[in-house]
Image (cartoon, helix red, strand yellow):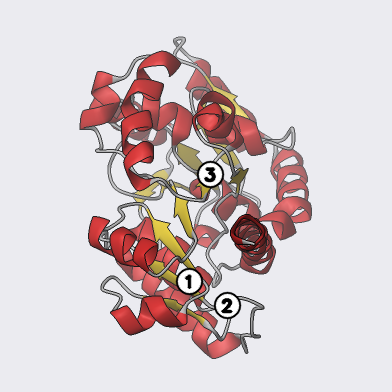
Amino acid sequence: MSKVDVNIGLEFLQKSFMPQASPLRVCFTSRSSAGAWQIRGQQIAAMRSNWVATSQPSDEDIEQADLICLVKKPDIRVIERARQMRKPLVFDIIDSWAQPEDGLKCHNTHEARELFLPVWRQINADGYIFPTWRMQEDLGALVKNKVTIYHHYWPQIQKNKIRSRVEVIGYEGADYLGEWRSRIEKACRERDIRFIANPVNYADLDIVIMARGGVHGNFLSWRYKSNVKLANAMGSGTPALVHFEEMSAHDTDNGDVMFFTDQPGSFERQLDRLINDHSLRMHIHKSFLSLAPCFNIQNIVEQFEGFFLRIFENQRNNNE
């Protein structure tokens, strides 16, 4: 996801929502400036009037907060100051490993546990937010207090109109397609379809593609990356054609995600099913929109808030 997209989302939230106060004052912070921080830090914080998001929290920011939420890349100095002030810490694990380097080192769940355990022990948070159920299922035993909270879709997203003819298919995000890109482009040329990357709006697409290849087609990325692309497909009602290794799509699939495999012809056959059946695309559109409220920012923020309250109460009870 480009920084332009997330900046537009934040601007949309600031103009469109009147944030209410939370029972807790929360400070979100990260050393990262990536999209994950902007979505899980800045956009989430914008939904409550007494939540702040800052990459360099002052002592006053930490002192005024009831809880600190570390996103993606925590600053050890912030952790130390928060501990000195006896503030509860929550770590949002989203995209918190070196990519693709760590992904190339880990080939199974055992190796993933060996990678994350020492990092999480050093952070020693009071609560952990997993981006997908699959990651919590694999690694949740390494920590005590945890929850799975999925990505919300773009706040500014528009609903797809589902045109009668498929003319454009696209891919959103950095170019992690690897070998899939040439195959997708070839299929598009043969069918007189345009392929675009990083659309301004999902509603500009007739079908969205989700896949990873090359160095980015690895165990950690396939298994633990977030659902953000599929959330955007659901939020806009855009039919999605997804590589079967994308585990977050399996986690959030409502039965209408179209999967393809590495087998010769699998991608092309699934693409043709969508191209040739307008009623199928309309069915997926309606099905996705019916599930979309689960992934709107209001719902996701309530999940954050509920978990924060739980962690805050745990610490208060432990200190009594």
Q: Earlier in the sequence, mark 2 or mark 3?
A: 2
User: Residue at point 26% right, 73% down?
Assistant: 56
Gap in angstroms between the C-alphas marked 3 and 1 = 17 Å
Q: In this rendering, is residue 202 above or below 206?
A: below
Camera-side residue of 234 and 180: 234
Occupied quadrant, residue 292: bottom right
Residue 13 picture location, percent across and down: 53, 80
Local secondary structure at mark 1: helix
Asked whether the viewer can see residue 55, the reply is: yes
Disc 1 crowd, CA 10 A, few/some/many (<14, 14-19, 20+): many
Q: Amino acid at mark 3?
A: Asn
**Label 2 sits on residue:** 47
Gap in angstroms between the C-alphas marked 1 and 2 = 7 Å
Query: Which labelled disc corresponds to residue 136?
Result: none
Disc 2 crowd, CA 10 A, few/some/many (<14, 14-19, 20+): many
User: For this view, does 69 lie left or right of residue 283?
Assistant: left
Local secondary structure at mark 2: loop
Q: Amino acid at mark 1?
A: Gln
Occupied quadrant, residue 124: top left
User: Residue at point 32% right, 42% down?
Assistant: 122
